[in-house]
Image (cartoon, helix red, strand yellow):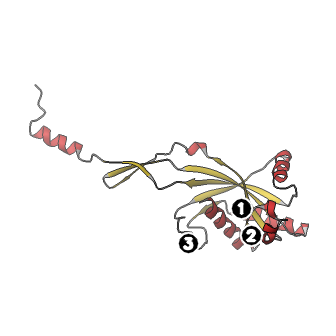
Amino acid sequence: MIFEIIKILALQVENYTSLNVELGNIANVDSQNGNGLNNRTVVTLVNYNEEGTLRNVPNRRIEGDRSYLQQPSVSLNLFLLFSNTRNNYEEALKDISKVIEFFQSHRVFTQSNSDYNRAQYPNIDNFQFHMDLHSISFEDLNYIWGSLGGKQYPSVLYKLRVVNIAEDHVIDQAGILGQTSQNAQNSTQNGDNQPL
């Protein structure tokens, strides 16, 4: 689910800005594995955390006359670094500006407002996430680029809220009592519940 959502997001940025957007690890740009990341806007997952406010979502669903208990889904926030690896620094800054402009006008993404090949991602049937610019201190920025290999590119960090991850695994199931009030009413009319 994480891969599919980031891939769909990268496609939206590419379609809107006409930039070459690639999902990849920015730390690999100078390695043999990173040849496809040169002169592109690279989307890198640098961190994630659980959205604690959504932890207590009900985990029981009802279908027909059955009740199904499942583990609650995990709601994640993803921290995505958009970096531009152009050799021309001025053009790299322009490209990062295009990314910021895109997210300034497109903050909420759903299946209905996103253009992607639905046959390629059949498991993504319903999603909604928000993109927020995530400002960090110079110290945190230095730490991020230090952990990514030290070479800094023009970049911007966004927080993608919220990706729900759930396995369709039923823990328990039970029938639902549906006609209790009707049976009680019939018993009263027949005189079965008269006081002693």
Front disc: 3 or 1: 3
Please state which amino acid type lies under the numbered disc 3.
Answer: Arg
Residue annotated with mark 3: 118
Residue drawn at x 90%, y 66% as measured from the top left = 89
Cα separation between marks 2 and 1:
14 Å
Q: Position of residue 47 (x, y in %)?
A: 71, 51
Q: CA distance from mark 3 to mark 2?
A: 19 Å
Q: Please tell me which residue lies in front, 99 or 50.
A: 50
- Mark 1 neighbour density, 10 Å: few (under 14) some (14–19) many (20 or more): some
Give the answer, above or below, for where 14 lies relative to 140: below
Q: Residues within 10 Å of mark 2 (few under 14, many from 20)?
A: many
In the picture, measured across the screen, residue 162 lies left or right of residue 156, that is left
Report which quarter residue 27 is drawn in: bottom right
Instruction: Give amino acid for label 2.
Output: Val
User: Eyeballing the image, is 189 above or below 23?
Assistant: above
Query: Residue 102: percent from the left, percent from the top?
Result: 73, 65
Label 1 secondary element: helix
Amino acid type at mark 1:
Phe
Q: Residue at x 69, y 73 (%)?
A: 15
Which residue occupies 59% across, 67% down?
113
Q: What residue is disc 1 on? A: 103
Q: Secondary structure at mark 2?
A: strand
Q: Position of residue 186 (x, y in %)?
A: 14, 43
Instruction: Tell me the quarter of the picture where residue 117 sits.
Output: bottom right
Q: Which residue is mark 2?
A: 21
